[in-house]
Image (cartoon, helix red, strand yellow):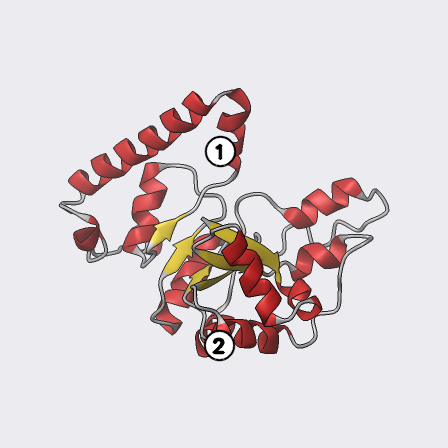
Amino acid sequence: MFGNIGATQLSELNTETIINMVQTIGADGLVIHLNAAQEMCQPEGDTDWRNVYFNIQRVCAQSPFPIIVKESGCGIDAETARNLASAGVACIDVAGAGGTSFTKVEAYRDKQNSQTFDEWGIPTAESLKRCRQSVDLPLIASGGMRTGIECAKAIAMGASLVGFALPLLQAAIRSHCDVVSYLLQIANDLKKTMLLVGAKDIAALKQVALLQLSSYAI
């Protein structure tokens, strides 16, 4: 279990307070989320992103538990990934474009808001690729992930974990049994995909050769 805090909120709290909050709830670590695009599209959004890198760095330096930094639907580029690695984060969740668009959500909330940034962001697969080429940190692939095949693709591309949000929320609205059923289906499809590509375990799946779609273009 991980706590969660926005990157802009770090400036409002000293490091000791942040650590105490995480330890009080018995969490195993803390997720710091980046959502600049969403905040800028909110009428009440926090647009002061000064010293964000410094604040992430100070929390990482003093924290006794792992710090994960994640985007919220816009993806993370190579340079940002390298900066986060230098700051001391333990893991990066790329959270790319392809799933829920929070900039689009804000446009619906505020009818006066421009829809210019509805499609803003780096697609999850591209963000994962760029981050994997840039840092040697565990990576979480999230942002539009829906099937076991997509999980297999993400792991083969270098993801350590895969994250889901919308499908689990939709299932949870129905029942906890539907949540379990959905996860079991994902796991079963992942196993089938691994069999089809000849990967006996996750370690082997990470070594599967990748083919570019353009290789089959006519």
Residue at point 67%, 67% (across, down): 13
Q: Nearer the viewer, mark 1 or mark 2?
A: 2
Residue 217 seen in the figure:
no
Judging by the rendered image, the residue that carries numbered circle 1 is: 167
Marks 1 and 2 close (CB-CB < 8 Å): no
Side of 211 where 166 appears, left or right = right
- Residue 133 versus residue 118 in the image, above or below: below
Side of 149 where 24 appears, left or right = right
x then y, percent, for residue 124: 47, 53
Residue at point 34%, 34% (across, down): 186
Residue in the foreground of this view, choosing between 204 and 44: 44
Judging by the rendered image, the residue that carries numbered circle 2 is: 61
- Residue 199 versus residue 12 in the image, above or below: above
**Label 1 vs label 2: CA separation?**
35 Å
x then y, percent, for residue 144: 49, 43
Residue at point 66%, 77% (across, down): 51
Label 1 secondary element = helix
- Residue 119 versus residue 83 in the image, above or below: above
x then y, percent, for residue 182: 39, 28
Side of 38 where 54 appears, left or right = left
Residue 90 seen in the figure:
yes
Q: Earlier in the sequence, mark 1 or mark 2?
A: 2
x then y, percent, for residue 22: 53, 57
Residue in the foreground of this view, choosing between 96 and 83: 83
Side of 154 where 29 appears, left or right = right
Q: Identify the amino acid type marked 2.
A: Ala
| Quarter holding residue 129 | bottom left
